[in-house]
Amino acid sequence: MHFNPRYASLPAKLYHHQMPVPLKGAKAGHFNQALADELQWSAEDQAAWVEICSGQKTFAEFEPLAMVYAGHQFGQWAGQLGDGRGLLIAQIVDQNNQTIDLHLKGAGSTPYSRMGDGRAVLRSVIREYLAGHTLNALGIPSSNAVGFTSSEQSVQREKLEPGAMMLRTSDCHIRLGHFEWINQYQGDLLPEFTQKCIEWHYPDCLNAEQPILAFATQVIQRTAVMISHWQLVGFAHGVMNTDNLNITGSTLDFGPYGFMERFRPNWINNHSDYQGRYTYQQQPSIGHWNLWNWLNNLVPLCPADYDKSQWKEDLAQCLEHFEPTFLEHYKLGLNQKMGLPSFHKDSFDCAMAFLRILQSEQLDYTQSFLRLQQHDYEAILDDCLDRRAFENFLAQYQSIREHQDTDALDTDMAKANPQYILRNHMAQKAIELAERNDFSEVQRLFTLLSQPYTKQPELEQPEDLAPLPNDVPEVMVSCSS
Ligand code: AMP
Ligand code: MG
């Protein structure tokens, strides 16, 4: 491994050094060897992955630390938060020369644990492990993980569950909430901290006339692009608090997430989200709200030679990039999923008509796009009560595609419509087996979801392809983790 311990160069008030506290009886869960290779782990490091992913082995080159941050949770100011159960155990350089954080989740309590026990349970670790892997394989910016371990030590949630640890990777663990903490409690650190964020994550902004405005604009644009990816694949993050969004627009800290099955844009997958603040359909506007909140923390950075009210206006102007960036990427992506040409004036309306049918007929989002891609219109029609609506859609759809290069459109479609997503019941089955020390289903899903756009008949199971039947209750995703 090649180390770049840059976070520890920041003022000490921003973190607390401490070592992980291993769980009793750590045992191997799963190891992502391809990722370890990308991260330039030596053979020796790879051989020691269980020790590393269970907090028994740390690195002389990096002193583990917990970061402090704050945040707005469910729309309310929550004050100081911080790594309550995770530690940054290294920052290393990958094969593309990018610095990647290794964050050990479940590593024991920290000064920021508040009432929590500092632990993570196997159930939530497997959910995050498989989802991060899936998002990466789908081409969506996201954290990932090198591996996870289970243990013989129980952790109390609604019931006793096996404790576990996961070694998460991300290009950035600096959250919008870092700025909120600094601004609220340690304002003097704001200029230096912002400067480091720009140097580390947006170095091209250093050359802009106003680096901070350029930085803000890019954070906003990357977040908008990330959310457009979520919408296209049907991913609901579940806890879009400002402490769970980072400044590089890569998906982070998704606990009670869900990959949508039947198309219900207002479906609540996080059972503690009583008001439906973080439903699928709300994600773009919540992203906008979070960024607006974040921008307020850049107000004190007004340059000396700048008019203060102009500075505020210019910051607000940065947010004007959010909606067009989101729409541009969402529309392009949706047309690609539909196999419609982006330049055609009716393509997007036609796509919307398709989504309205999926919604009113409660059809499976992923499967319906695949049927469209396979030109299996009969299969969709058979599932529709309102056949007329689908026939009208199909007439428009086919008239737009007439005289187009449909082979090229279909090739593009295949790159945008996954054969497999991580359905809740798939993860659940893997968890139930893993809790009995059988990690074979984790392994199967890991392999299957490594290539989500490729049909793998020898590996897939019938339940991977469709939602559970209506008379089988959906898995309740607990928010405890
Ligand atoms: P989350 O919603 O999981 O991102 O967590 C919100 C905050 O609560 C973060 O500061 C976490 O570190 C902290 N937290 C969550 N679960 C625990 C736990 N079991 N022990 C300590 N802190 C926790
Ligand atoms: Mg969090």
Image (tube, grey):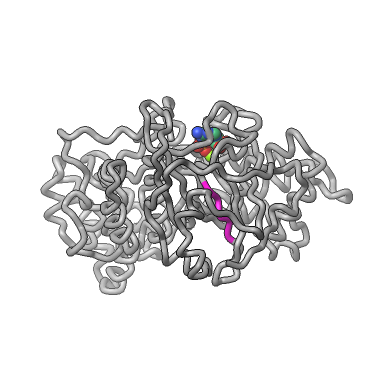
Note whether 81 is above or below 363 in the view shown.
above
Q: Is residue 365 left or right of residue 100?
A: left
The front one of 402 and 277 is 277
Note whether 449 is above or below 317 in the view shown.
below
Spot occupied by residue 432 in the image (x, y as percentages of width and height): 27, 41
The front one of 274 and 479 is 479
Is residue 185 visible in the rendered structure shown here? yes
The front one of 58 and 402 is 58
The front one of 441 and 475 is 441
Q: How many labels sit on residues? A: 0
Identify the magenta region: 100-104
Q: Is residue 404 left or right of residue 43?
A: left
Q: Quadrant of the C terminus?
A: top left
Spot occupied by residue 409 in the image (x, y as percentages of width and height): 30, 69
Whether the magenta-drawn stretch holds residue 478 is answered as no
Farthest-out residue, front:
25
Name the image quarter holding residue 24: top left
Note whether 23 is above or below 367 in the view shown.
above
Q: Residue shown at 34%/52% (left/top)?
A: 349
Q: Is residue 206 left or right of residue 33?
A: right
Farthest-out residue, right:
305
Q: Residue shown at 53%/30% (left/top)?
A: 116
Q: Quadrant of the N terminus?
A: bottom right
- Overall secondary structure of the magenta section: strand
Spot occupied by residue 118 in the image (x, y as percentages of width and height): 53, 35
Q: Residue shown at 45%/55% (left/top)?
A: 50
Spot occupied by residue 368 in the image (x, y as percentages of width and height): 23, 52
Is residue 280 visible in the rendered structure shown here? no
